[in-house]
């Protein structure tokens, strides 16, 4: 069985997309969603995800708030902002352009 791939260059896009579909997730849930939705092909590591979430929060793309769960543990929930929705649209557009270009190169023989 192959080891899941890292998310070089696509982490922001994936996080923003997941939060657009499932608002108010904590970091571990975002990591799990990436892995599950990709069919265990992609994996976000804590060392990449949390700095990315912090950067996205500073950029105004996501907002975070602390909650206390029923078991007494605290969790930081993230949700998309209006600016984050705009950024998601830009990231998706860029991704489509890049994948189309790669596909053109792959089809050339």
Image (cartoon, grey):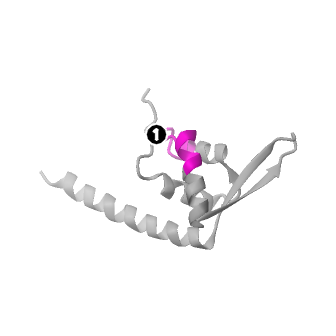
Using the image as rendered, state which of residue 53 and residue 58 is in the foreground.
58
Residue 54 image point, x, y percent: 60, 54
Residue 46 image point, x, y percent: 58, 40
Mark 1 crowdedness (10 Å alpha carbons): few <14, some 14-19, many ≥20: some
Count of numbered circles on the image: 1
Q: Residue furthest top?
A: 1
Judge left or right: residue 74 versus residue 18.
right
Which residue: 80% across, 45% down?
Answer: 74
Which residue: 87% across, 44% down?
Answer: 70
Residue 36 image point, x, y percent: 57, 42
Residue occupied by mark 1 = 41
Judge left or right: residue 47 versus residue 92.
right
Judge left or right: residue 18 versus residue 103.
right
Using the image as rendered, state which of residue 86 and residue 55 is in the foreground.
55
Please report the bounds of the magenta region as a residue range: 34-51
Question: Looking at the rendering, which quadrant does residue 5 occupy?
Answer: top left
In terms of secondary structure, where does tag 1 sit?
loop
């Amino acid at each position: 069985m192959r080891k899941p791939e890292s998310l070089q260059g696509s982490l922001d896009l994936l996080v923003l997309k997941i939060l657009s579909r499932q608002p108010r997730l904590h970091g571990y849930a975002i990591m799990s969603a990436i892995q599950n939705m990709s069919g265990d092909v992609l994996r976000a590591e804590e060392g990449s995800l949390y700095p990315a979430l912090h950067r996205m929060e500073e950029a105004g793309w996501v907002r975070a708030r602390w909650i206390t769960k029923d078991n007494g543990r605290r969790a930081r929930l993230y949700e998309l902002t209006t600016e984050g929705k705009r950024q998601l649209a830009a990231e998706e557009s860029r991704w489509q352009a890049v994948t189309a270009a790669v596909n053109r190169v792959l089809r050339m023989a």
